[in-house]
Amino acid sequence: MDKRDIVQILAKDSLLTEDETKRSFEILNSQSEESSPWFVQLLTGAGAWLAAVMFAIFFGFTGIIKDETGAIIVGFILVAIAFLISVRSKQAIPVFPDQLLLATSLTGHVLLMVGFYSEFNDQHYIAAVVIVLLSLCFILFYKNQLHKFISTWLLLAGLWVLAAELGIQPLAFMALLVIVVAALSAWMWMNESHYLSGRWKNIGRPVQYAFVFALLSGEGIIERFYSIFWYSRDWNQHGEILTSFPYTRVVSAGLFLVLAYVIILIMNRLKIDWKSLTGAGFLIFALIITIVFYQSPSIMAALIVLLIGIERANRILVPFAIMALVYFYGDYYYSIDMTLMKKSLILMSSGLIMLAGGWLVRRVGQVGERS
Amino acid sequence: MLSLPKNLSVDKSWLYRLASEIPLDGEAVESALCKMGVLPDRNDWRNWLMLIGYGLGAALFLTGVIFFFAYNWENLHRFGRFTFVGSGVIISALAAYWSGLDKFSGKLWLTAASVLTGVLLAIFGMVYQTGADSYMLFASWAFLIFFWVFAARFQPLWLIWLVLINMAFGRWFFVISHHWPGYGGIFSEWIILLPVVVNGGILLIREKTTIIHNSYKEGRWFPRIIAFCLLGGLTLIPVEGIFSGGHGGVWVVLLVMYFVVLLAMIYFYLNVRHDLLMLTLAAISIIFVLTCGFIRVLFEGGTDIGGIFFVGLFILAETTIAARLLLTLSRKWKSHENTNG
């Protein structure tokens, strides 16, 4: 079935008006602008980043920026130039100026962050507020998709830093952020088709990917390093803060709800009643996974992304989630306090259970086909 | 029967473009995705769950076996150790035979047998303390499993075999090179000469024949990994020449090989088999070399640190030109596909 057949079927099902059908054929016949492959975007993004670093070094070493105030002023000018040109441009910006603007903006961001952080040494929340507001503006109005992705990640990081600076228990806020980001990721991805057009069309995609990236990277980082930036100033605080909030239990509970939500949506689409034996079986399995891995919510996060990736047939999410799952699982077993003997028995048992599970799914399928 | 899910390979980028430009509502897009076979149906989900179950299950089980073995190593008699791992090799090989090498499960079993062969060799070396160098382990391992690798026509197993070959050569060179007069250290260009020939040869075989895989439609990740490592290693040759002047002998040979490989890749993936990622790798290599050349020219002329601004601009210009060319190519190929149906 080719593209034209699909369009005709949609028209026949009254999902497309006559005008929309005609326009669809015109677009299919023309050589329209399309988004570039991910590796070309990676190339341009890497080039922009490298150039931004070079520009920042240039500003730093040539004495144009003499102090923090200079960094803030220059940073603001660069960001403003990039933002205004992008927002005011009515047509798509050609590749070279677009990359130049991206590098200019990123350089400005770096200078602003460094400038505000240094200038307000005892009030770092000001730097966080600036980053949060700046990121919001860029997500909503700036045209470059890669920049929206970076800005979304910066927004989340900025929110967490802001909360910590305002005295909110950092682990509690991080737990809330992880659960909210997981929920938003699941909601946006499972309803992906509704974010491809209208006012969401330029925001949906980069934000969706940024949420997934932030979820997995944030989880990985928090479980490993726990805020290198903020708590390196006072290591004595670590023990108290780490034990004062049940982070892993709270996040695991929250991620279980998100996982259950994703499973229920998938079952709804496949017309499997979640109250039936099969449906309940899947939800119970999700609960078992949560209980077994409650000490490592990153495994749950990777599993959620994997299910979303499979359901939406996304070629970036699936391998990314598999790599994350393998890494987090390996890290979990590496770090738990157990003898090698016990670890080996647990791994062999869980391996056999997974193999049995795969076999069971196959048998159920074969029985279903025969009936 | 277990089969690899196909819904991931369906191209849906044209639908997303329509959704954005018309615009289409969410219901129409979802309906189209269903009809295109993008959204997995119950069979697809069953295949995915089986793949995850078998794949993860096998990985967990094997890891558990390795940990068990590591824990009990000291207490096991040497024949116990050989029996334990040797049984694994035999069972995996038999399971591969019963499953059949045309099936994914059969290929997985043969991969397990190949990996366990190396474990067996390692145990042999540890038990008998022959004093053999580590390159002999990798070389023997690669030699013993070669027939299985050839028979399986399974890209992951070929990748494991290639890694073994490269490690064997690397270790061999490290050990014997101290005995060569005029030896230039482990970073001498000799270290990459044979791997370049072997890896380049495997890449050529992969692209021109079906010896390594079942059909030309199988995943492209394997040749891309080889091309990345091949071109990545060779790119250091002209860079070395730029910053340290280079020297005759092997370096010249390798420099010629760099240009040959680069031009061959560009020609092949531009005209014979369209692969934009491969051309992007070639572009990255060229950008890297040109940038190093620019830095050398700029700073050798006595430019101060301010010249770094121009380096940034140069990088931007290069990546922009490369991206533009690649995008133009991509559109041209897509348009050609649309015309031919």
Image (spheres, coloured by chain):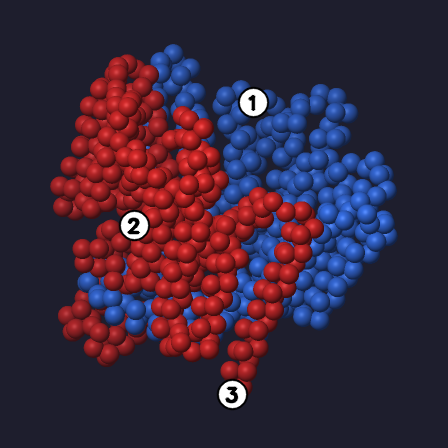
Q: Quadrant of residue A137?
A: top left
Question: Which residue is the extreme one toward the top?
Answer: B302
Q: Chain of mark 3?
A: A
Chain of the residue that carries numbered disc 1 in the rendered image:
B
A296 horizontally vs A342: left or right = left
Pointer 2 and pointer 3 on the same chain: yes
Among the 4 quarters of the image, the one containing residue A23: bottom left
Viewer-closest of B266 and A248? A248
| Badge 3 amino acid | Ser
Split into 4 quadrants, where in the image is the N terminus of chain A? bottom left
Q: Secondary structure at mark 2?
A: helix
Q: Nearer the viewer, mark 3 or mark 1?
A: 3
Query: Which residue is identified by label 1?
Result: B246
Residue wearing tag 3 = A371
**How far apart are the alpha carbons under marks 3 and 1?**
72 Å
The three-letter code of the residue at mark 2 reads: Val
Please indicate whether residue B154 sits to the left or right of residue A5 in the image.
right
Identify the residue at horizontal 66%, vertical 31% (top origin): B190
Kind of residue at disc 1: Gly
| Of B7 and B227, the residue lying toward us | B7
Disc 1: CA contacts within 10 A as few (<14), some (14-19) or many (>=20)? some
Q: Nearer the viewer, mark 2 or mark 1?
A: 2
Judged from this view, the residue extending furthest toward the bottom is A371
In the rendered image of the structure, the colour used to display chain B is: blue
Q: Which mark is residue A188?
A: none
Tell me residue A148's x, y (percent): 27, 44
Residue drawn at the location 25% of the way across and 59% of the way down: A196
CB within 8 Å, label 2 to label 1: no
Q: Colour of chain A?
A: red
What residue did someone put label 2 on?
A: A207
Q: Does residue A277 lie above or below A321 as drawn? A: below
- The kind of secondary structure element at disc 1 is loop
